[in-house]
Amino acid sequence: MPVYEYRGQRISISDDDTEYKGYFEAARDQRLVVKRCVDCGLLRGEPGPGCPWCTSLKWEWRQVSGKGTIYSYQVVAHTVLPGFRDWAPFPIVLVELDEQSGKPNPGDGLRITANLLDEHLSPEKEENVAIGSRVEVVFMEGEDGFFLPQFKLSGEAPQGQLWRYQT
Amino acid sequence: MSDMRRKYCIVGVGETEYSRGSGRTTRAMATEAIRNAMNDAGLSPQDVDGMLSYHSGDSIPSTSVMYDLGLRLNFYMDCSGGGSSSEALIGLAMGAIEVGMCQTVAIFRSMNGYSQVRVGGTGSRAAAPVSGSDVEIRPYGMISPVQRFGFTFVRHMMEYGITGEQLAHIKAAHSNHASNNPKAIMKQRVTVEDVLNSRWIIRPCAHLLDCCLETDNATCIIVTSADRAKDLRKRPVHILGVQGRGTKPGGDFHYQHGPISRVAGYYVGPRVFELAGITHDDVDVTGCYDAFTYTALLQFEDYGWCKKGEGGEFVSSGVINLGGKRPNNTSGGHLCEGYTHGMNMVIENVRQLRGTVDDYCLQSQDGVHTYDYSEGKCRQVKDAEISMNMGWGTPAVGSALIMRR
């Protein structure tokens, strides 16, 4: 069972894992993937074993563009994880991927969690973190072949009006 | 379904000291809390034949404490679950009695939530290997509940313009209540400015004082039929309606289904009001789960105490304060009395409906109160007849309970 050490945490993904193993294997190849239902064709952002829309158990990994928009965010000012102390304050963002936005129901989307990083793969400055900002995937290399999908600002025009809380 | 409205009662409540360093096991605390609740009800060991508990790998099973109190159980179950389990297990206790599996059920929660397993993620929880769905979030530094809920909070801020100052009113109100509660860990009254000046935990939705207090404590609630309740020591509190652990679509917090600023109360609320046969206007006192100020605000909106998006004005208006129209968390709640995964908010409302809240009034246990809500005085709501609890598990999971004296 591979156990990866990453920022002081032991990330354990067993050989018989059916949810996340393929996701991290693809990340090692610089590909961002989501599960696609073989029967109804819908993608799902949370890689569970069944299709939330048609209950099919048949699925395959499907590469997506890796482009998306920040849907929500938070800036961690106080972390309880020692391996993240040198990063704090650091942003965690909820990214809505471009694929299947607003489908199959209004308000649905493929949303995944990541850090927002700069070009040096350090935490992006807080004043640059905003809902509506366009982002693209980058792959952060850890130890022992562990690669983690992350996001950085793409420089594209924002989707709608940018929003960040004015303190 | 047959009408459950007058059939079941809460007849005993009890807890241990709310502390940050109990110096004893969850077994020892659970035993004391159950014993206190049995004494409160006037029940002997042979009268209690059912037991329910919930835990998240941080407690002891019913079979340990039944031995410690000399009970023989006809039914017991220890469930995995966090916030919103209190109300849910009250409903399950009613079901167990209704089908004849047992007659009187003690529900307990015991946690060394400060000195041993901390919900916030420090200690043993942070050291364990990261597996399952946690691999989606832990590599990004997301571990504590406020972080897991944070996307919902911040998206809600964007959609509706909620401010930190508005959230701080919730903490200020609950701290005023706690100042009249001898049991509360944090009895000191705080102002909106105190909250805003406390250090940030996550920006922009949670300062330190927007977060609840990890606590060592055990609690117990005893449920039995209205018929048996008549012979017991305390005035019974009747259960009008309970809706346990309802979810929103995709009952998770993977945030795949919008609007993510909507919480489970949107679905749970109409059901529990229908079961209880009452409306919002009938409710005199509420217990709205305040793991964070924001969990309370979201539930006020989605249970319909105000319009969606107007929670900020609602919590700033004085409605939720003692002396206001419908006080919330009169014990100080999780923000000030202590964090117990929801149990203490139900216990507080039982005492409110009995009219014997344990405040600083000299004859509080005889139901004599001054109704002077200034610091160090009274916290009894005058003539409280109906209460409502709104339990929170995650943004997607919640329970509700309506009781009548």
Image (tube, coloured by chain):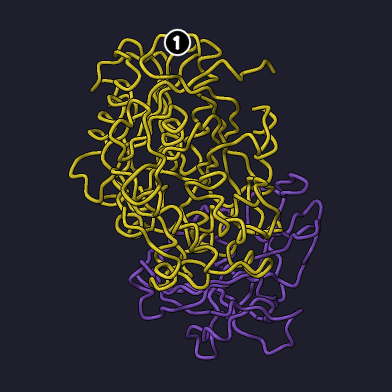
Chain B image colour: yellow
Res. A46 visible in picture: no
Q: Quadrant of residue A25?
A: bottom right
Q: Residue at x 52, y 52 (%)?
A: A16
Looking at the rendering, in which quadrant would you find the N terminus of chain B?
Answer: top right
Q: Position of residue B122 (x, y in %)?
A: 33, 60
Q: Residue at x 61, y 66 (%)?
A: B162
Chain A image colour: purple
Could you tell whether B121 is left or right of A119 in the image?
left
Q: Position of residue B314 (x, y in %)?
A: 61, 56
Q: Quadrant of residue B222?
A: top left
Q: Nearer the viewer, residue B172 or A122?
A: B172
**Chain containing mark 1:** B
Q: Residue at x 55, y 14 (%)?
A: B98
Please, which residue is most extreme toward the left here?
A: B23
Which residue position holds label 1? Answer: B230
Could you tell whether B391 is left or right of A7 in the image?
right
Q: Residue at x 42, y 15 (%)?
A: B104
Res. A8 visible in picture: yes
Q: Position of residue B377 (x, y in %)?
A: 33, 45
Q: Residues within 10 Å of mark 1 (few under 14, many from 20)?
A: few
Could you tell whether A85 is left or right of A145 in the image?
left
Considering only vertical position in the picture, is B220 above or below B125?
above
